[in-house]
Every structure is written in structure tokens, then in C-alpha cells.
Amino acid sequence: MSVISDVLAKVKQLDPDQPEFHQAVAEVMETLEPTTKRHPEFVKANIYERIVEPERTMLFRVPWVDDKGNVRVNRGFRVQFNNAIGPFKGGLRFHPSVNLGIIKFLGFEQIFKNSLTTLPMGGGKGGSDFDPKGKSDGEVMRFCQAFMRELFRHVGAETDVPAGDIGVGGREIGYLFGYYKKIRNEHTGVLTGKALEYGGSLVRPEATGYGTTYFAAEMLATRGLDFKGKTVAISGAGNVAQYAVEKVNQLGGKVISLCDSSATIIDESGIDQNKCDFVMELKNVKRGRIKEYADKYNTCCVEGSNVWDVIRDQGIKVDIALPCATQNELDASHAAALVKNGCVCVAEGANMPSTPDAVKIFQENNILYGPGKAANAGGVATSGLEMSQNSLKLSWTREEVDNRLLIIMKSIHTACVETAEAYGRKGDYVTGANIAGFTKVARAMLAYGVV
């Protein structure tokens, strides 16, 4: 057996009940086989086995009181995966589906995503099986405070810097940061995604959606294409999807879809900026369901299906696909339908939204495919810029932050292209992203010795 197959076998043996983690490790490790020959020093130091094992994993109880005075209990998680190139960095996800395997997959992905940004950030992830949907602001606040009562002892501006993710937006970050500040009696950049008033960065809310679109534009440019006049399918309706819509509109494309966990809307006339503003108000303030968009604008609404189901079942033509919802939302049948319907580019705004079989179909059909660790790295990159501003005790202008984000996304694209070509896989963004992200972290781990 090879070094890589040995590592994969051990991961499955040690954690048999974590399929998402197995999938993430396999996706990365299988592309790293060429590095074992080019870098025997990595093999000798057992870097491959060490990098799939988290440095530290925390699982804790989160008791809190609901509006009726009932004591509720959830699970909290924080996986500090690798800090070879900087403090642990990665979001917090509040969603009923959260378990240790999902947090480990997200934390593992974060190692390479953060490495690609060129900023000094390690990889980590956390969250809870708490569901903020349907909860009052008071209940969300009490949960966040209970969650931080345990998390505070494991995080810090130079140790571990969480951010938001699914279910954790500006409201939740405010409650978490406020309680951390209270119990630690200090105002430091321990969380990113903060509001401007207390240390946040301009463009941070927009960064993941903008960055995904910037990365897609770079991929398109390799074939002399751009967004102008293109029909774009976007899944999700949260922060990433909203700002991907905004940036696609600015670049001349037409977005026709959004979805949430209950329904998909298809608007063939395009989701322009006025409609996008309605979605932002609906989801961020009213915390409503996407079906209300269809009611207001009299568009197609399919309940119980995601965007890719509807595109497959109705044969809708799209040029560009930006999956921005959640892991494994886009399977082989969806990928085949996208290819058949004329799609030329897929850039992932979510983490691992395409199944391995879907990725294989994209690559076999010469579709431009940008994996999440590269395409959606703009969010954590701008979190890194927020950390820099917090350390400097100053704020940059919107133009400066957006320009830095654009430069970072261009550099990530260049690293993917050049690394893929250097390893004989020209045009393979998966191989390029994985090897470029891995080798930087591996060299740092090697420099430290066995720690």
C-alpha cells in the first residue's frame, strides 16, 4: 500500500462514523500522491498522517433557558486542526445537522483554504447542533452566551479566532463577542465578522460571495469568457448567495435561482439588485422563507427541492453554476444535467457542495471547476484582513479591502493554475489547490520538528 492509501485506511478505521470527514480527507489526499515522490522528507516526517489528525478537539455541553423558562441542552464543538502557519481560524456553524464528523471535515478543509490565502492563519472549525431558526433574539442571545461560557477558555486573538458560518451571522457574532469581552475584560480581535462599530471590517459580509465570483471570473478568463450576458444559477439564500448575486449583477450576468431548506425559486427574468435587496431584507431581518420571493414577484417556486433538482428536472439552461448552500447538495445527476444544459463553469461558494461523482463528471467534460477551498476562500481571507486591522487598531476603506480581496483571489487562482501545471495536471484546479495549500503547511510542520 502507498503512504496515501495507508492514511486513508487509518482515518476510516479510527473514525468509522464520520463519512463527511472521510470524503474531505480522500478528496485532498488522493491528489497529494505526486508530492510523496517529490518530497520524501514529508514522508519521512510522517506529515501525511499528522495533518489528518486534529491538534485538539473539544466537545462540550451547552445548557440554556428558552423563553418559556425550560432548560434546553445542546452540544458544542471546537476542532483546532492545525496552527502550523498561524492561529487556528475557522467559522462556527449553528445547525441541527452539526456533529463531530462535519466539524472535522470543515476544519480539515480550512487548513488548505487558509494556506491558499497567503495570510498567516491555521485551520479550525466549531459550532453546535442548536437551530437558530424560529428562536427569539432573547433565546439566541442566551444560547450564544452559554456557548461562549465554555468556548472562551479555548480561543484568543493569537490562539484561535472563530468567525461565522451557517446559522451564525452578525446577530450571533455580536452576542458571542459581547459575552467574551465581558468575561475576559478585554477588547481583542478574538472573533471576525464583527459589526463595524466594534472592530469589524468593511466588505467582510460580502467577501465570500464576492470572492467566489471573482474566482469564477478568473477561471472564465482563461478561456476568453466573462460574466456578461451569462445565465447564472446560484443555490442558497444566505450571506454567500446574496452577495454572489450582487457581484454577478455588477459583472453583467443574470442570476435566475435561489433556494433555502424549504423551496427553490426560479426567476427567468433575473434577480436584479432591487430583488436582491428584497432577499437580504427577507432573510437577514425578517428571517423569512424564500417562498415569499415567489409570492411577491410571481415567479416559479418548487417546494421540497434544491436549485440543482429543479434545473435537472425542468431542463433549465445555465452557463455558470455557483453552489452556495451546503455540503453534498450537488450530486452526479445534477452535474450531468448541468453539462447537458450548457454549463461551462462551476465555482463553489459553499464547502464541499459537490459530491465526488459530480466533480468527476465536471472534470471529464472539461468544465471549469473551482473547488470550495479555493473559490470560497474570500470570506476567510477578509477575516484575515479584519484580524490585521484589529491588530493595527485601524480601519481600511471599502475600496482598499475590496481591492485586497480581489488581489488575494487572483493570487489563489494563479497558485492553483501554476501548481497544477507543475505537477502535470494542467487545468485541474482541485489538484492545484490541494497541493499548493498542503506544501506550505507541510514545510512549516517540517521546520518545527515533531510537535
Image (tube, grey):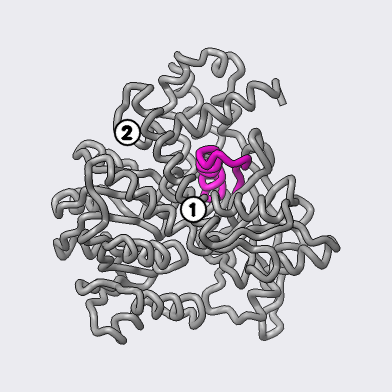
Residue in the foreground of this view, choosing between 202 and 163: 202
Q: Pinpoint residue 29: horizontal percent, then vertical percent.
A: 45, 30
- Marks 1 and 2 sit apart, C-alpha to C-alpha, by 26 Å
Q: Pinpoint residue 294: horizontal percent, then vertical percent.
A: 29, 81
Q: Pinpoint residue 277: horizontal percent, then vertical percent.
A: 40, 77
Reply yes or no: does residue 80 show up in magenta.
no
Q: Earlier in the sequence, mark 1 or mark 2?
A: 1
Residue 358 seen anywhere in this rendered image of the structure: no
At label 2, the amino acid type is Asp
Residue 115 seen anywhere in this rendered image of the structure: yes
At label 1, the amino acid type is Asn
Q: Which residues are magenta?
A: 102-125
Secondary structure type for disc 1: helix
Identify the residue position indicated by label 2 in the image: 428
Can you tell which quarter of the image residue 137 is in? bottom right
Residue 448 to residue 226: above or below: above
Residue 399 to residue 376: above or below: below
Q: Pinpoint residue 264: horizontal percent, then vertical percent.
A: 30, 71
Identify the residue position indicated by label 1 in the image: 403
Can you tell which quarter of the image residue 209 is in? bottom left
Sort mark 1 into few (<14), some (14-19) or many (20+) by Cα contacts within 10 Å. Answer: few
- Please state which of the two labelled residues, at mark 1 or mark 2, is closer to the viewer: 1
Residue 151 to residue 43: above or below: below
Q: Quadrant of the C terminus?
A: top right
Residue in the foreground of this view, choosing between 420 and 160: 420
Q: Which mark is residue 300?
A: none
At a point 45% along the width and 80% down the height, the residue shown is 281
Secondary structure type for disc 2: loop
Is 387 displayed left or right of 323 in the figure? right
At a point 61% along the width and 58% down the height, the residue shown is 396
Is 387 displayed left or right of 280 in the figure? right
